[in-house]
Image: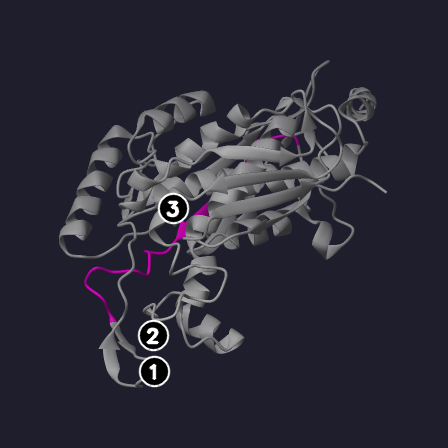
Amino acid sequence: MSLVFRFLTAGESHGEALVAVIDGVPAGLPLAESHINEDLARRQRGYGRGGRMKIERDQVHILSGVRWGQALGSPVTLQIANRDWENWKSTMAVGEPEPGAARKEVTRPRPGHADLAGAMKYGHRDIRNVLERSSARETTARVAVAGVAKRLLAEFGITILSHVTEIGGVHISPELDLAWEEIRRRAEASEVRCADPPAEAAMIGAIDDARAKGDTLGGVFEVVALGCPVGLGSYVQWDRRLDGRLAQAFCSIQAIKGCELGLGFESARRPGSAVHDEILLDPGGGFRRSTNNAGGLEGGVTNGQPVIARAAMKPLSTLRTPLRSVDLATKEPVEAVVERSDVCAVPAAGIVGEAMMAIVLAHAFLEKFGGDSLDEIRRNHAAYQDALGKW
């Protein structure tokens, strides 16, 4: 059976810690906490973030599965402490509350959030039991898991970048034509992770305007994987198609309402002659394409070009000028509860998008080249590359 990269996360937004357990990390993979902490810091940055990011300084602690800087092949356990736990020990206590302690229940669900549907599904009368786990704080653990996935992919020359293409209706210029590495460099230097300076300034202005109105903004980010070999994924069953797995992974991110690959919805507006990437042959150099409208995926399989996905993020559902709701306890009309939140989290969501891309690709990579150790995977990968060179 091929090695499979899989994981579970646990923990609440204001609980003591977030935890992730990863199975399928090959023995011999070099792994240090610093490999993961860099992306945790990137996730916390971005113009429009709220007060929570000023409190937390996310750092991972590896609890198991690594010895002397290398993975053992056994499950890897990661923990990220919540610094804000000190202020929530009573509210989020595991045991029974102390006698006489105030029970501050949340009963005013927010439109657009998991609050009401989650409370009805699990039978919770206190919405805090829902919002603590459904919160996007959970993505901290996913980004930590992806730090491990990215380490594996990097061993084989696969890297991942992201950038913001739109916030609140302000989008980058369609004429922006830059190399991927330049887009990466500009995005990392931008407060909104946008590679187009005029659009960046307009996005910041839109966020400021929304903040002044007590409103929130969504947007679109793009994630790109460079260096993927031909042949990840499969066309033989619906659940093995890599495009479907990527779409599911992106839409699993909190507040994401849509995903497109390559041209995406634009491909529905063009004739086939303006969509499909022609196949060319370089003498002695193999197959190539002059375009990448498919986004690196054909028939659910990577074709050797950059894998490109975009995700649409809705505005966050916690508004400082709240919308109408109904109190679960009294059934009276009320304004929705106001939890501490961001005005715009699209720049941070791009980092989470990178994480989900890395996790899906790591899984697919191990399906294709699986082995119990990094050395075994290298041998399998090298043999496959040699075979491709004969085409």
Verify whether residue 206 appears in magenta.
Answer: no
Looking at the image, residue 4 lies above or below residue 127: above
Q: Would you say the magenta stretch is mainly helix, strand or loop? A: loop
Q: Element type at marker 3?
A: strand
First in sequence: mark 1 vs mark 3: 3
Q: Are marks 2 and 3 in contact (CB under 8 Å)?
A: no
Q: Amino acid at mark 3?
A: Val
Q: Amino acid at mark 1?
A: Ala
First in sequence: mark 1 vs mark 2: 2
First in sequence: mark 2 vs mark 3: 2
Q: Are marks 1 and 2 in contact (CB under 8 Å)?
A: yes
User: Can you identify the residue that label 1 sits on?
Assistant: 329
User: Can you identify the residue that label 3 sits on?
Assistant: 220
User: Can you identify the residue that label 2 sits on?
Assistant: 107
> In x, y percent, where is residue 277?
59, 36
Q: Residue at x 23, y 78 (%)?
A: 334
Q: Element type at marker 1?
A: loop
Q: Nearer the viewer, mark 1 or mark 3?
A: 1
> In x, y percent, where is residue 330?
30, 85
Q: Magenta stretch?
A: 304-323
Q: Amino acid at mark 2?
A: Thr
